[in-house]
Image (cartoon, rainbow, N blue to C red):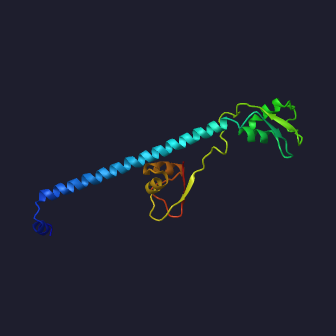
């Protein structure tokens, strides 16, 4: 059949081989370009996420417009006020010292008192990770025909992250996932 088509087109086999070779090179070039451009996008997204995280940490490190005055409400505590102004309840000590509140009874606040909120560095104990800073994993429900590679590629942008998903979910055999299973995708 192939020879009959060649006779009708009157092309030598070498021309067809060259055309097919060119087509293979073209497809390989397109795939390579897509791979690197997708990785570049992923890297730039990672850089943006890192910059946002740095900005978030800097924002937390700089308390809002201090020094300030605060009028005590009925349900207030020094801890709650410190969390509002500093993002850390541990700064209650700074507020108590500034307002000469007794260290023996720092929870004694009267509604209507006006407290001075001093400019102070945020106090965090070593290893403290506040709830706002923790990143919850994304959940993915396995569909029929899914593989860890396909899930990792879809959810993280790289199929190579399948190992992270397998480890995070403590999968005994990563080749065995069933539709309906809920996997946690680490971020």
Query: Is residue 170 or residue 83 the one in the foreground?
Result: 83
Work out whether 8 lies above or below 37: below
Question: What percent of the width, then of the height, locates residue 29?
Answer: 30, 50
Query: Is residue 157 or residue 147 the one in the foreground?
Result: 157
Question: What percent of the width, then of the height, locates residue 93?
Answer: 79, 32
Question: What percent of the width, then of the height, locates residue 133?
Answer: 63, 43
- Image quarter where the N terminus lies is bottom left
The residue sitting at 29% across, 51% down in the picture is 28
80 relative to 130 in the view: left or right = right
Question: What percent of the width, then of the height, locates residue 82?
Answer: 76, 38
Quadrant hosting residue 126? top right
The residue sitting at 19% across, 56% down in the picture is 19
How many marks the image carries: the answer is 0
Work out whether 84 lies above or below 25: above
Quadrant hosting residue 6? bottom left
69 relative to 34 in the view: left or right = right
The residue sitting at 49% across, 46% down in the picture is 45
Query: Is residue 160 or residue 169 the one in the foreground?
Result: 160
């Amino acid at each position: 059949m192939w020879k009959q088509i060649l006779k009708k087109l009157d092309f030598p086999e070498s021309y067809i081989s060259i055309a097919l070779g060119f087509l293979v090179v073209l497809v390989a070039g397109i795939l390579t370009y897509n791979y690197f451009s997708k990785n570049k996008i992923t890297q730039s997204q990672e850089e943006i996420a890192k910059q946002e995280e740095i900005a978030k940490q800097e924002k937390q490190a700089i308390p809002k417009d201090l020094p300030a005055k605060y009028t005590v409400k009925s349900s207030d505590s020094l801890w709650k006020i410190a969390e509002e102004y500093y993002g850390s309840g541990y700064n209650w000590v700074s507020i108590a010292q500034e307002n000469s509140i007794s260290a023996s009874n720092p929870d004694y606040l009267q509604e209507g008192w006006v407290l001075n909120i001093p400019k102070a560095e945020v106090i965090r104990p070593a290893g403290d990770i506040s709830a706002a800073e923790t990143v919850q994993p994304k959940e993915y429900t396995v569909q029929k025909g899914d593989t860890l590679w396909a899930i990792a590629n879809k959810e993280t942008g790289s199929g190579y992250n399948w190992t992270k998903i397998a480890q995070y979910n403590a999968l005994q055999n990563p080749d065995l996932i069933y539709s309906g299973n809920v996997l946690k995708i680490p971020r």
